[in-house]
């Protein structure tokens, strides 16, 4: 039986040009959603524009759920030239998450240089598929 409502939320960027030089994961500003889920699979999707100020260095993204990095969701891209902007989009289907309140975040890091997410063009979408 189809559902008439979708249990989902969206977070959008409001901080302009967030950046990191951290080689360990840090939160992407505003990319956090706390919502109550049904225990069904949850679909997470993130997109942004990113650039790296150092050639041949990478930017990595990961979804974090309730303070734990979902390592299998990690995605990265190496930038062959300085300050080349790239659209980054990825999704992750989380199964086995119990019913209740959960916090979903996007984090990023680099392996050198500085990553910048130009402007405010980024969003996180979380949808409970129950």
Image (cartoon, rainbow, N blue to C red):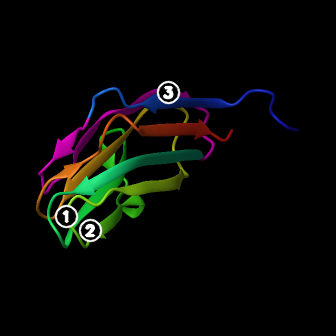
Q: From this viewpoint, is residue 101 visible?
A: no
Q: Quadrant of the N terminus?
A: top right
The Cα atoms of the two marked residues, 3 and 1, are separated by 38 Å
Q: Residues within 10 Å of mark 1 (few under 14, many from 20)?
A: some
User: What is the number of the mark on residue 95?
Assistant: none
Quadrant of residue 80 within the rendered picture:
bottom left
Q: From this viewpoint, is residue 128 visible?
A: yes
Vertical relation: 11 (above or below) 43: above
The Cα atoms of the two marked residues, 3 and 2, are separated by 34 Å
Q: Secondary structure at mark 3?
A: strand
Q: Is residue 28 covered in magenta?
A: yes
Front position in the image: 28 or 81: 81
Vertical relation: 106 (above or below) 23: above
Query: Residue 110: x percent and y percent?
Result: 18, 59
Front position in the image: 39 or 31: 31
Q: Is residue 92 covered in magenta?
A: no
Q: Nearer the viewer, mark 3 or mark 2?
A: 2
Quadrant of residue 16 within the rendered picture:
top left
Where does label 3 land, which residue? 35
- Tell me which segment is drawn in magenta: 17-41
Please, which residue is most extreme toward the right here? Answer: 1
Instruction: Judge from the rendering whether residue 15 lies leftward or rightward of residue 129; answer left or right.
Output: left
Where does label 2 land, which residue? 79
Where does label 1 land, which residue? 82
Q: Secondary structure at mark 2?
A: strand
Q: Secondary structure at mark 1?
A: loop
Q: Residues within 10 Å of mark 3 (few under 14, many from 20)?
A: some
């Amino acid at each position: 039986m189809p559902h008439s409502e979708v249990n989902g939320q969206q977070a959008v960027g409001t901080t302009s040009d967030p950046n990191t030089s951290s080689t360990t994961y840090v939160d992407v500003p505003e990319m956090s959603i706390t919502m109550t889920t049904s225990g069904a699979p949850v679909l997470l999707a993130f997109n942004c524009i990113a650039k790296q100020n150092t050639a041949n260095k990478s930017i990595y993204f990961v979804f974090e759920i309730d303070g734990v990095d979902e390592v299998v969701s990690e995605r990265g891209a190496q930038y062959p030239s300085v300050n080349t902007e790239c659209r980054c989009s990825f999704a992750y289907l989380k199964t086995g998450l119990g019913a209740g309140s959960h916090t979903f975040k996007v984090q990023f890091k680099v392996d050198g240089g500085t990553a910048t997410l130009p402007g405010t063009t980024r969003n996180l979408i979380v949808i409970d598929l129950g």
